[in-house]
Image (spheres, grey):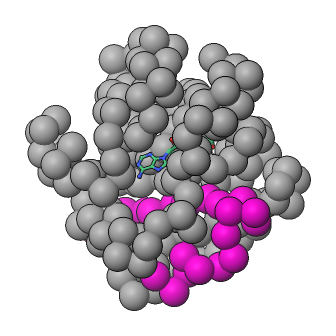
Amino acid sequence: MSTLSYVKNFISDKYIASITPTSDFGVRKVCSKIDFSRCGLVVEYGPGTGVFTKYLLQKMGPDSLLVMIERNANFAKELRMKFRDPRAVVVNGCASDILDTLAEIGKPAADCVISGIPFSFLTDNQKNRILRNSYAALHRGGKFLAYQTFYQSNNHLKSHLEQIFPFVQVEYEMLNLPPLRIYEARK
Ligand SMILES: C[S@@+](CC[C@H](N)C(=O)[O-])C[C@H]1O[C@@H](n2cnc3c(N)ncnc32)[C@H](O)[C@@H]1O
């Protein structure tokens, strides 16, 4: 699975939103906010070609679980072939369905939700539905991490997060091209 595969899918699906996958700088900066020693269940929204997935599986423990929710059917298929790891579950669906997904796999709550989906393409109602369901899906103390390139967004997500999560912080990774805005929200 390559940048070429990413670009091909980008051309036919506007919800992919970014022309290249996130860089190593971006992946490391976002994931530096995760305490992997306390993460039994991570949910990843919009894994794409799996740049975060690869890093997360390297860092997560042997008894942990990574549930990927990917809207694009081609990416979901490629992810299933690439990550033949008993800790990885790929769901071809929408992030808004996180509560149903957790119920289906028999897990009550997640420790961390990490999201690469383009929130700027969504209506306020769609954004709020995903954020509210993500909040409901987290354990108390659990984290919601979202990354968006500067092209994908102004700082619109912060106010939506602040209506739902008691703690919200925004940081940047300027070495990613284009630079990333990273949101960290805690339940
Ligand atoms: C900007 S790309 C990020 C891909 C990858 N995580 C990365 O960092 O390179 C956005 C991804 O989110 C997926 N996506 C968009 N909307 C989604 C939704 N509502 N639920 C799940 N996945 C979604 C797209 O298909 C795409 O794979």
Image coordinates for residue 145, horizontal then vertical, percent: 52, 60
Image coordinates for residue 18, horizontal then vertical, percent: 69, 47
**97 or 165, which is in the foreground?**
97
**Residue 173 in view, yes or no:** yes
Going by the picture, which residue comes out furthest to the front? 12
Residue at 59 percent across and 35 percent down: it is 12
Is 153 within the magenta?
yes
Instruction: Please tell me how many numbered marks the rendered image carries.
Output: 0
Q: Quadrant of the N terminus?
A: top right
Residue at 71 percent across and 53 percent down: it is 29
Locate residue 184: give its quadrant.
Answer: bottom right
Is 124 within the magenta?
no
Image coordinates for residue 111, horizontal then vertical, percent: 35, 53
- Residue 112, above or below 12: below
- Residue 144, above or below 23: below
**Residue 39 in view, yes or no:** no
Residue at 13 percent across and 38 percent down: it is 104
Residue at 75 percent across and 63 percent down: it is 151
Q: Quadrant of the C terminus?
A: bottom left
Locate residue 22: give its quadrant.
Answer: top right
Magenta-drawn segment: 138-160
- Residue 1, above or below 125: above
Image coordinates for residue 129, horizontal then vertical, percent: 30, 70
**22 or 173, which is in the foreground?**
22
Is residue 56 left or right of 42 when viewed as pictured? right
